[in-house]
Image (spheres, rainbow, N blue to C red):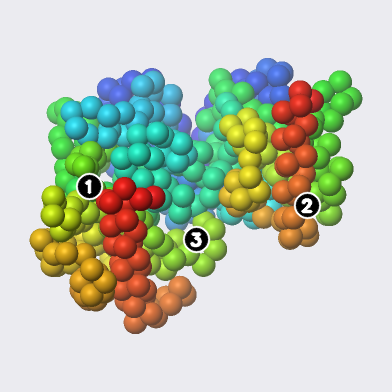
Amino acid sequence: MDKVAIKVNVNGTERAAEVEPRMLLVHFLRETLRLTGTHIGCDTSHCGACTVVMDGRAIKSCTAFAVQADGRSVMTVEGLEQDGKLHPLQDGFYQEHGLQCGYCTPGMLMTGIAFLGENSNPTDDEIRHAISGNLCRCTGYVNIVKAYQYAAQKMRDGGA
Amino acid sequence: MIPRSFEYFSPRTLDEAIGLLQKLGPDAKLLSGGQSLIPMMKLRMVSPQHIVDINRIPGLDYITESDGQLKIGALAREHQLETSDVIATKLPILADTAKFIADPLVRSQATVCGNLAHGDPANDHPATMLALGAKVVATGPNGQREIAVADFFPGLFTTALEPEEILTEIRVPLPPANSGGAYLKLERKVGDFATAGVAAQITLDDAGNCKQAGIGLTNVGMTPIKAIKTEAFLGGKTLDEATINQAAEIAASESEPMDDIRGSADYKRDLVRVLTARALTRALARAKGGA
């Protein structure tokens, strides 16, 4: 099948490639662009490890084709740190021990980016609802909720 | 998991999309949110030769009020139902329903129209749209036609859409004053399909009796079920506890569940009874101005 030329703005940089239409967005990010921060967990739209932000919306990159990202902006975990400074959400996961094995963390972070963009002062319940599509098998989620709250506070205080 | 190869089209207008469906024939499949289609392609349960991606057609992502109806465009995402003011005030049953669908990440992509067009009796919006008496607009080579949701699901995974038609809009009549509705669903975990789900929408008359009732059932039959006997029973009744419980028994008898990993047919039938009573109780509270 013919390849399709696409241009995707990934973490602020225009990336051009020719891809098979059936290539999943997560494979494009990991294999074509070698941005391996985005993880593949279940590969069945359940676990959220592959979450990225496309045009402001957190989506599962295992359940989108790379061609769908043509002309759009995609942010991955690699795009969070700026000038050697952690994003408040990354800092929150660090300060509050929001991870153990770290496998779910990139997805948890990207879900949080979109969520805190819409809700800058969430309740714990709202956070738990927001991360209900991201599975973590280590933490029991308690410290992830705290990490989101830490970031929300810091961002409200003008930390980002 | 990697789907079989396909040819990709990304039309910029509805006419172009319909032209492609005409030209490519039945091996073409529309891609909107893709949250049912892409998993099925990855599992190779379906392998369309052509994908027509409608996401780049402008102007289809609306949720608006006009002509006494709520209109939901083909590219309105589930997430929009959760954040819409008009839905929160006039049709909270739609926000109830959206919140039960998959998870927030899936809902940021998944479309409401796709939830109907997929034709899966396990999907949640069909029951709600049946309860609300909604219609869909099918747009094809000969223009538009309206189809009542009650006539939209002739069988398992089939819809009343012709192969060259696109479901471009859902039209929900805006409920009159003293109306309320609710959708309830039992799921084993976030994102699971319903073990059973029940949608109830009622309107009260000036005396506080039930003037009109709509009841829809999820995943307890080969198609979404409009519980017409329950609806007829409720007409004109005072919705006290005894009446609600009687209606719930009738709804259970109208369900046609099968044994599967989510439970036995008997269990699901009883679940329809329990959920119907709870959904009617919440609908009644909302009709009286509560949340």
Asked whether the residues under marks 3 and 1 belong to the same chain, the reply is yes
- Mark 3 and mark 1 in contact? Answer it, CB < 8 Å: no
Residue at 20% across / 71% down in the picture? Answer: B243
Asked whether the residues under marks 2 and 1 belong to the same chain, the reply is no
Residue at 31% across / 63% down in the picture? Answer: B281
Q: Which mark is residue B178?
A: 1
**Label 3 crowding class (10 Å Cα cut-off): few <14, some 14-19, many 20+?**
some
Give the percent coordinates (x, y) of residue B75: 39, 32
> Mark 3 falls within which chain?
B
SS for tag 2? helix
> Is label 3 or label 1 in front?
1
The amino acid beneath tag 2 is Asn
Give the percent coordinates (x, y) of residue A60: 59, 42
Tell which of B275 and B27 is nearer to you: B275
Left of B197 or right of it: where is A34? right
Image quarter for residue B59? top left
SS for tag 1? loop
Query: Can you identify the residue that label 2 sits on?
Result: A143
> Is label 3 or label 2 in front?
2
Q: Earlier in the sequence, mark 3 or mark 1?
A: 1
Residue at the front extreme of this rendering = B207
Where B270 falls versus B172 (above or below)? below
Rounded to the nearest whole Å, what is the CA distance between mark 3 and mark 1?
33 Å
Rounded to the nearest whole Å, what is the CA distance between mark 2 and mark 1?
44 Å
The amino acid beneath tag 3 is Asp
